[in-house]
Amino acid sequence: MNRFLKWLPTILLMLAGLSLCAQQAAPLPSVTVDFGKTPTGAGLSSSLQALLLLTVLSLAPTILMTATSFTRITVVLHFLRQGLGQQQTPSNQVLISLALVLTFFIMAPTAREINTTVIQPLQRNELTTEQALDRTAAPLKVFMLRYTRKKDLSLFLGIAKAPAPKTKADVPLECLLPAFLISELKTSFEIGFMIFLPFLIVDMVVASILLSMGMMMLPPVTISLPFKVLLFVLVDGWYLIIGSLVRGYTG
C-alpha cells in the first residue's frame, strides 16, 4: 500500500501528459447550428424543431398548472371529496384525469389559435423563434387576463416596480402568472366553500340526532356518509359542479 501511494503522483502525471498529447493530436470537434434562411427570416432546422418540442414537453406540467384552468378544477374537486367525507374515493388518479380532460376541453380554443398562428407558420418557416414565442404568449395572456383580478395583478406589478401596462400585450408575463394563480386559488376556495356547506349541514344534523338519542359513542361521520352520498346523487352533483366549472370559463 505504501509503495502504491509512493508511485501515485507519477502515475497521475503520466496520465495527464497522455491526455494532453491526445488533445493536441486530435482537437475536439466543433459544433455549429444552422438555422437556415427563409424569405421572411431565419428558419428552424428539423433538429432544432425537435429540441424545441422536447423543451415544450418538459415544461408542459408547469405550463399546465400555471397558465390554464387546471388549478381551479383540481382544488374544487378535492374540496368535493373532502366534503363527501371520502379520503380515497374518487382516487387522486381519477380526479387528476378528470381535471386534465376538462382542462383540455376549456383550453381547446386557445390551443387551436396557437396552432393556427404559431405552429403551422413555424413549420412552414414563416416565423422566427422570437416571433413564435411572442405569438404563443399572446393567446395565453388574453385567457389569463380574463380571469385575473386587477387587485392581484396590481400587487405583483407593484412588487416588481413595473410600469402600468397600456395594453394587454404590455402586461409582463412574470407578473401575470402569479396574479392569475392566486386569483384562481381565491375563486376555487369560494366554490369549495359553497360545495362544502351543504355537506357540513348534513353532518351537523346527523350529529345532533345522535346526541339527542344518546348515541355519543357512534361516530357521526359514519352515519352521515350515506346521506351525503345520497344527497349528492339525488341532485345530480357531478352535472351541476362540472357544468358550473366549465361554464365559468366558456360562458
Image (tube, grey):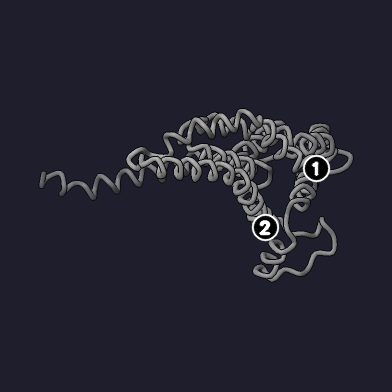
Where residue 113 appears, x then y in whole percent?
Answer: 82, 37
Reply above or below: 249 against 229. below
Marks 1 and 2, the one that precedes in the sequence: 1
- Residue 142: in sight, yes or no? yes
Q: Quadrant of the N terminus?
A: top left
Residue 199 in the figure: left or right of residue 9: right
Identified at 56% across, 33% down, the residue is 95
The local secondary structure at tag 2 comes to helix
Q: Quadrant of the C terminus?
A: top right
The local secondary structure at tag 1 comes to strand
Under mark 1, the amino acid is Ala
Residue 227 in the figure: left or right of residue 45: left
Reply above or below: 203 against 229. below
**Of 143 and 200, which appears nearest the observer?**
200
Under mark 2, the amino acid is Ala
Crowding at dot 1, Cα within 10 Å, few <14 / some 14-19 / many 20+, comes out as: some
Instruction: Find residue 179 and report its image quarter.
Output: bottom right
Where residue 204 appears, x then y in whole percent?
Answer: 49, 45
Where residue 128 appears, x then y in whole percent?
Answer: 80, 44
Crowding at dot 2, Cα within 10 Å, few <14 / some 14-19 / many 20+, comes out as: many
Residue 42 is marked as 1
Query: Which residue position is annotated with label 2?
Result: 179
Mark 1–mark 2 Cα distance, whole angstroms, equals: 35 Å
Identified at 76% across, 34% down, the residue is 108
Identified at 65% across, 69% down, the residue is 159
